[in-house]
Amino acid sequence: MRHNFGAGPCILPQEVFKQASRAVLDFKDGLSILEISHRTPEFEGVVEEAAKLVKELLAVPAGYSVLFLQGGASLQFAMVPMNLLPQGKSASYLETGVWANKAIKEVVNFGTANIVASSKSSNYTFIPKDYTIPEDSAYFHCTSNNTIYGTEMFSLPETKVPVVCDMSSDIMSRVIDVSKYDLIYAGAQKNIGPAGLTVVIVKDEILGKSGRGLPSMLDYKVHIEGGSMYNTPPVFSIYVAMLNLRWLKAKGGVAEIEKENIAKANALYTEIDRNPLFKGTCAVEDRSRMNVCFVMENPELEKPFLKYAEENGIEGIKGHRSVGGFRASMYNALPITSVHTLVELMQNFAEKHN
Ligand SMILES: *Cc1c(COP(=O)(O)O)cnc(C)c1O
């Protein structure tokens, strides 16, 4: 058995894979989900249910729209300023890692990115906390979970400007208060479903104020009016996301999975802190529950440990090249038994090498 700790695209529940594969062969009256028209009532029902599940699971208040788009979170880096930033104006960004930087890079064609705080000088090992957001910012942009560096933002700054958040790697992993955000976006391939789909949750009243003409496909309002079907949507990705969200709801929803995610994170961080061979790379209070980054006290043992872990069924724990060491991603569908297996291997390895 393989334990998939990959950072993304990542593990989904086995039963979701089984249901999805059945729908590839027979979704409706012998027709595959891959061949049916997206304009059929059956598929319209899928989109409606998927949007309803997002709203239900995150308790999205009235006045927000849920959209299923394409182009990944990376397209949102540009769509956000394009839709929300009047030409030449400034938006505030919190610089907490590679993804935040890619978002910042896209602002230049539309206005100015004002970096309110950064943890770059310490290789993004913490989340900056004391900073002020100028009140004339068009919006404030942050990344709730820094997938590469393993830090997570557990609180939002107080601000009157609209808050935009890239939640690609921790959406649906913990309870959030959506009313504190004006726009949330997430590439689906971490906690929602397969690649090819981006979920956007947007407060309707913030749109239409940029004064800029937009290509239809890049205009949130066009997608709201089209019910996420202005053009052919990623039918299969939406279907599998719907199955995964059904799975999450049946498990007890986000509050319940949050408890499991806390237990998984505690199990692994406890071992990292206890085991003399390993150490965490991030500020303890900012440690991500989704992506656990750690290194070895003796870097020469990293290759042998990786080999030992891989030989024993552990998949995807090699750290990102910008951090090194290891990264264990523990998205919703990763069972706690997989975490226990990794912890045991760390203990066995320490016994052999002490
Ligand atoms: C993976 C990831 C992205 C990139 O998403 P794409 O869908 O590949 O564009 C952006 N932001 C964060 C926080 C991520 O984890």
Image (cartoon, rainbow, N blue to C red):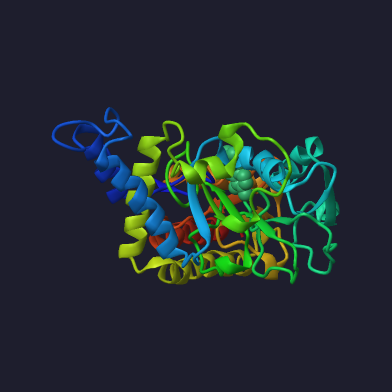
Please provide percent x and percent y for residue 48.
Answer: 35, 50
Answer with left or right where residue 59 lies relative to residue 86. Answer: left
Residue at (45% x, 50% y) in the render? 192
Residue at (70% x, 60% y) in the render? 162
Residue reaching furthest left?
29
User: Which quadrant would residue 80 be assigned to in this image?
Assistant: top right
Location of the C terminus by quadrant is bottom right
Q: Against 269, is 146 above or below?
A: above
Please provide percent x and percent y for residue 236.
Answer: 35, 36
User: Which quadrant would residue 79 be assigned to in this image?
Assistant: top right
Answer with left or right where residue 313 lies relative to residue 118. Answer: left
Q: Is residue 303 visible in this depiction of the protein?
A: no
Looking at the rendering, the quadrant in which ligand 1 lies is: top right
Q: Against 259, is 26 above or below?
A: above
Q: Against 90, is 251 above or below?
A: below
Q: Between residue 97 and residue 72, name the one nearer to us.
A: 72
Q: Is residue 153 visible in this depiction of the protein?
A: yes
Residue at (67% x, 70% y) in the render? 155
Residue at (83% x, 64% y) in the render? 135
Answer with left or right where residue 242 lies relative to residue 23. Answer: right
Please provide percent x and percent y for residue 197.
Answer: 48, 40
Please provide percent x and percent y for residue 1.
Answer: 34, 46
